[in-house]
Structure formats: structure tokens, C-alpha cells
Image (cartoon, rainbow, N blue to C red):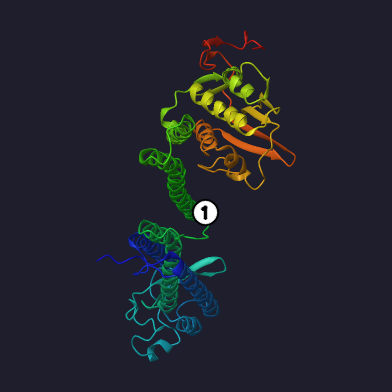
Amino acid sequence: MTREPPSPRSGVRPSGGLGPLGRRLFAAFAVVALASVALLTVAALVGTDRGLSSAHQADRQEAADRVAAAAAGAYRAAAGWSTADLSAARSIAVAAGAVLTVRNADDEVMPDASGAGSEDEPGMPGSGRGRHGQGVGSGPGASAPVVVDGSTVGSVRLVFSAGSGSAGLSVAWGWVAAAAVGALALALGVSWFVTRRLTAPVVRVASTARALAAGDRTARARIEAPGELGDLARAFDAMADDVNHVEQARHRLAADVAHELRTPLTSLRAGLEELRDGYAEASAERLASLHDQALRLGRIVDDLGELAEAESARLSLHVAEVDLTALTVAAVAEREAELRTAGLTVRVLPGPVPLLVRADADRLHQALGNLLSNAARHCRPGDTVTVTTSDTPAEALVEVADTGPGIPSDELPYVFDRLWRGTRARSTGGSGIGLAVVKELITAHGGTVCADSGPGGGTRMTLRLPRAAPYGSWLVPGPGVEPRLTSQANTPRGI
């Protein structure tokens, strides 16, 4: 049994928080964050260690210099090492936490001449006992020469305990470790937030797609997200709107086609049943009426076939460079008899020659013919139909304007819809397919068609097609006109 996904509009998120993509993204972010924090932590620890070591060594050297200065003073006061009182130097060494060793110029270890050293306990810092320095530690040390009146009379050596300065380094390491843990936690939190922000729109769109596939045509993502994710959500919603519109149009088309076919079929069946059952005589008038219904039925079927063919025109266009001005003149000439039979005056105002477009000449001829037939059907006797071709730097235009009764403003947005029958079509018996065919054909060529009607009457249909380059090429002006090669140098300016 398949469980339906939650509706995107209900605010319910899919179970599990993050989908597979979200989990992969979060894992990638977490690995990058962990590697970065580890690298920065190692660098901070190494840098801190070296900095503290340098600072401690500077402090040791400073203590050694002070001890050397005190030993020099004692040497100067006693005029030699044998009676020198080194207690001051020893006190400085003890204060610095180091073992003091004093050597004369012959590199011999000097005992404390004051005899204080003999009172020290063995291993006591600063004792310097023994000729060979018994009790001296093996930790880091510092040395300094003893200089008296510009002459080096000996040297001092301070040896510090092995754990000297480790307390500061331990504190620094503790702070670095705490900062690393905090940075890692912050990086993971930001990674989780960013992952949710990135994957939530995708999960929402996927949930909406499943809802649409399940038949909920009202499902929409409705996500306001920045960048490409927002564009994706908006494009998906626009696609869903288009699908919904197409679905409604399909249902409406089926209903309209059924209605259009039902009317002549009903009349035709009723008339034939009357003739069969003997309720009416098979007079010429009665048969003519039934024949008209059959013709109307045939026209509807033909129009539907044209519409289906136009909708697939993009797949069957035979594109070439076409002289739109010559093609328009040929289309008007073909429909001129129909227009004059309707009592209309026809005027043609040709524009530039050649007016080049890349198009299927037969399809454009069909579209222009439909526009002219539409004018002949809806205009009144005595009205004028004016066909004009013109151009802009990017487009070629054909306008079919008439002085007929016009189209109500509230019907203008729907005149190119399938089976739309406005006030004029209902009064003249149009099927509502001709202008839909025109729109499909022009759209298949990458162009546009629009209708305009003024409050005082009159209708103007405008076709816009992309222009082709006006250099040497074969022209296909339309049915019945021979193709010709033109170039910029020999282009004619008349028809």
C-alpha cells in the first residue's frame, strides 16, 4: 500500500529531516570543517609552543645576564675569584629557579668563596657544589660571560629544571583545545543550517511533484529562496500552472468539440428520421437544409484537422528564406474574390522588398489566408480591408486591418483561444478555430500575433516574425511564385 506524500501547503516536512542529498552534503561539510579545525589547531599549538619557548629562553638569558653582572661585581670587590662573595649571584639564580655554575677564565668551576654553599642541602638550586658541578640539573640552560673592565674573567651557567615553563604551555594548550572544540561545534551547526537551507527547497519541490503526479493539480511549491533554488521553485510552479491550464483547456476543448458536433448531428438525425418516418416530404428545401448541416459538420471536422496540424507544425516546418511582402501580395490575390464577394474593398500597402524572414511559405500563406477569411466573415458589406507589410530592425510585420464592427474589449484576450466564439463568431456561425490556427502557426515560426480593436469599431491583426539577414539567398515568396536569388547589390525595390 503506497502512502501519499504530505501536501506541500500543509507545512509538514518529509520524515527524517534530511534526505539522502542532505545527509551527503552535511557529511561533506562536516569533513571539511573537521579537517580545517584540526589543521588550525595543530598550527596554533605549534606556533604557541614555539612562541612560549622563545619567550622562556629570553627570560633565561636575561636571568643569566643579571647573574653574570652580580658575579662580576663580586669579582671586582674581591679582586679575584678566590675570595669573591657569590651569594648575590646565587640568590638571583635561586629566584629564577636555576642551578648556578661559575667558571673562571680557565674553565674551572668556582666554589662559593663565602662558604655559604657548604651550608646548602644537596640538590638545592643554586648550590653549585663540587668542583665538577655535582647536583647540577639537566634541563634547559643559559650562559653569560663575566666581564670586568672589558676583560672576560669567567662565565656563569644557569641550568633550569626540565619542567620550567611547561605550566604556561599547558594553559595555552587548554585554551587552544577549547577554542578548537567551540569552532568545530559552530562549524557543524552552520553546516547543518546551510544543508537544511539548500535541501529544503529541493525536498519541497520533489514532494510537490509527487503530489501533482498523484492528481493534486493545486499543489505548488511556493518557495521564496534566493538564487538558483528560488528560480527552480518558481519555474516548477510556473510549469505546474501551465500543466493545469493545458489540462483545463483539454477538458474544455473536448466539451466544446462535443457541443459543436452535437448541434449539426442532432439536426441532421432529426431531419433524416422525419424523412424516414414520413413526417416530412423529401423536398428540395428540406434536403438543402440537411445538406447545409452536413457541410457545417464537415467544416468543423476540417477546422479541427487544421488545428491539430497547426499544433504539430513545429515538427513539420520546411523553413527557407521567404519574401514576406511578395507572399502577402500573393495571399491577398488568392483571397480577393472571397473578399469582394463579401462586398469588401481590399487595399494592399506593400513595404520593403524583399522583406526576408526564415519561414515555411505554405504555413505563412495559410495563416494569412485565415486572417483574410476571418475579415471576410465578420465585416459588413462596404467595409474596407487594408493589408500592410512593414519592418523594424529585428522584425517583419504584417497588419490586416478592417473597418468592421470590431471586437469587444473584454473578448480581445480570448480571440486566439481554441473554439472561442465571441459575439461576432456566434452571429456569423464561426467555429472558433481559424484564429487559433493562426496563432499556432506563427508561434511555431518564433513570432507573435495580436489583435487590437478600437471603441469605434475596426479590428487590426498584427503578425510579427523575426527578420532574416538581407544578403544573398534563395527567396521562396509563396505558392505560384518562382524562387529567385537576391543580393544586396541587385535587390529590387518594387513588386
Instruction: Please tell me which residue lies in front, 31 or 145.
Output: 31
Crowd tier of the residue under label 1, counting other residues whose Cα lies within 10 Å: few below 14, some 14–19, many 20 or above: few
In the rendered image, the vertical position of residue 419 relative to residue 470, given as above or below: below
In the rendered image, the vertical position of residue 253 relative to residue 38, given as above or below: above
Quadrant occupied by the C terminus? top right
- Taking the image as shown, residue 166 lies to the left or right of residue 91, namely left
In the rendered image, the vertical position of residue 439 relative to residue 346, given as above or below: below
Instruction: Please tell me which residue lies in front, 30 or 226.
Output: 226
**Residue 320 placement (x, y as % from top left):** 49, 20
Q: Is residue 104 visible?
A: no
Q: Give the farthest residue toward the right.
A: 456
**Residue 317 placement (x, y as % from top left):** 44, 26
Instruction: Please tell me which residue lies in front, 270 or 162.
Output: 270
Name the residue beneath numbered marker 1.
227
**Residue 395 placement (x, y as % from top left):** 62, 28
**Residue 480 placement (x, y as % from top left):** 51, 13
Name which quarter of the figure residue 106 lies in: bottom left
Number of numbered callouts drawn: 1
Rendered residue at 61%/37% (across/down): 450
> Which amino acid type is shown beneath numbered disc 1?
Gly
Query: Which secondary structure lies at badge 1?
Result: helix
- Taking the image as shown, residue 407 lies to the left or right of residue 274, namely right
Name which quarter of the figure residue 389 lies in: top right
Q: Give the farthest residue toward the left.
A: 1
Rendered residue at 52%/10% (across/down): 482
Quadrant occupied by the N terminus? bottom left
Q: Is residue 96 visible?
A: yes
Name which quarter of the figure residue 415 lies in: top right
